[in-house]
Image (spheres, rainbow, N blue to C red):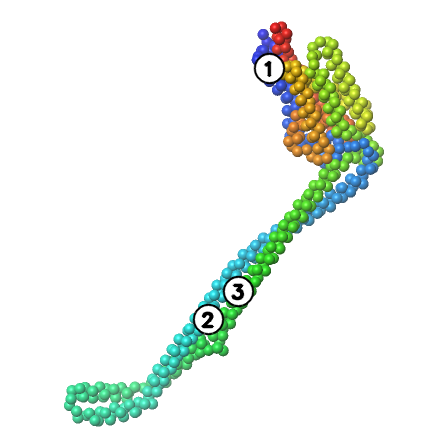
Amino acid sequence: MVTFQGMKPGPIVVRRAIAALIVALPVLVGAIYSLASGIDPADTWSDSTARAGAPTVVDDSVLVDARRATGEASSQAGLLTGGTKQLVDGVGKITGGTDDISTALTNGKEGTQKLSDGMTQLQAATGQMGQGATKVADGVETAVNQVTGFEAVRGQIVVAIDGYLERIKDAQDPDTVKLREDLGTLRQQATTFTLDDTTKSQLEEMKTGSREIAQQLSEPGQTYHDGIYTATKGAQDLNAGLGKATTDLEAALKSVDDLRTGSTRIDTMAKNTQAKIGEIQRALPTAQSHTDTDTRTLAPMYAVLIAAGVLFGATIRGSGRIHTKATLLTVVVTLVGLAVTASLLCLMVGFGLGAGQVAGITAITLLLGMISILTGSLMVRIFGGMWGQIAALMTALAQVGIVGWAWNLAATTAIPTGWLLATSLMPLHYATSGLVAFGNSGGSASHIGISLGVMIALCVSGLAGLKLLQPTVGRRKAS
């Protein structure tokens, strides 16, 4: 046998799972669309380009000064955050420059230290070289004096050789003969040895130059000697000066770090101030028009409470048996009573609602009541009598808790994505959204369309779920 649009009877668990999926499909689609479109509950009472707090029933002129002041504060906060950002960027550039200066100064300090050490060693080596150069100059002077003074004594040497040769001229001893020949050769060399003027000049220059070198290396007052000592002292002073500059720079760098930390804190404080001013702007009740007269207004939390009352009343009715004509009649009476009561409450707590808005509110509450009754009936059929009633009530409580908290947040600030997803999965959210959109002049038509579409789809899917589970119930009765 084929039942429910061609579907064969199957295990009850599979049927229950399919029924639950069918019922959940509309809210899943609604949640996905809400997240993808970036829909915010605040769109039901204010424009998305100028977020404002949840509306209250007050004269718009009362809010003008407060909103003007917060607007000016927001503008000033924007200028402040722009200035603090420039401050942070400027300090960042200074910090980058000081890093380069610190590196260069450190390298310079190392270089001057090496220069100072090298000049100190050169100064010590110069002193040692001066001592050696003095000895060399003394030796050169002695040698040159002896060479240049030879001509002065050459005659005496020749006379002495001649006298000695005269004494041994008749000697026949071989050694004496050999000595006589050598002396003759020496006399010849002494007679012929002469120094020209060039050689004498070069010898004098060598003696003078060696003495000059010795004096430059060892005697104070000489250019080279004093230059080495002056350069060494300058290198030492430069090294000491760079050392002090490095110490001063470290203190300056610490001050720059403190400046960077302080500017970052100022920038953070400015951004926080701007964010807080934005929260204040959003928390202020929205002015529904640009005139000094009151317009259509319904506070969101009133809408949540009214919708919650319809939800609980219809859920309790739906978790009972509704198979007989009598119970079906009570269901209709319950739906109508809840819708009328909800509409009257909206008229009482709202302001400026017309016939069109009341009709829309009535339609929304009728749909919410029908969804709640169908949900209660499905819970009973899926989980059984007592457990189904408990599950239906717990589901209703969960909806009130999640939706109430989310809409309470929306009254003063933007809803986090997680909360928006959670509340978009609740039928109560779409009922609240429709009520607030109908009850406020700034309500978005898209919210009304989405709310009606999802709620109508929930009614259809709920009826389909009941139809799917009906054969199982029928077989239980037959058994």
Q: Earlier in the sequence, mark 1 or mark 3?
A: 1
In front: 139, or 389? 389
Instruction: Please indicate whether residue 326 sits to the left or right of residue 4 in the image.
Output: right
* x and y, in percent, of residue 357 in the image: 79, 24
Q: Residues within 10 Å of mark 3 (few under 14, many from 20)?
A: many
Looking at the picture, which amino acid does disc 1 mark?
Arg
Residue denoted by label 3: 239
Tell me where residue 202 sits by quadrant: bottom left
Q: Amino acid at mark 2?
A: Gln
Give the x, y percent position of residue 154: 30, 89
Name the residue beneath numbered marker 1. Answer: 15
Q: Quadrant of residue 409?
A: top right
Secondary structure state at the residue bearing disc 3: helix
Is residue 289 in sight in this rendering?
Answer: yes
Q: From the viewer's side, name the closer residue of 446 and 379.
A: 379
Q: Can you see residue 461?
A: no
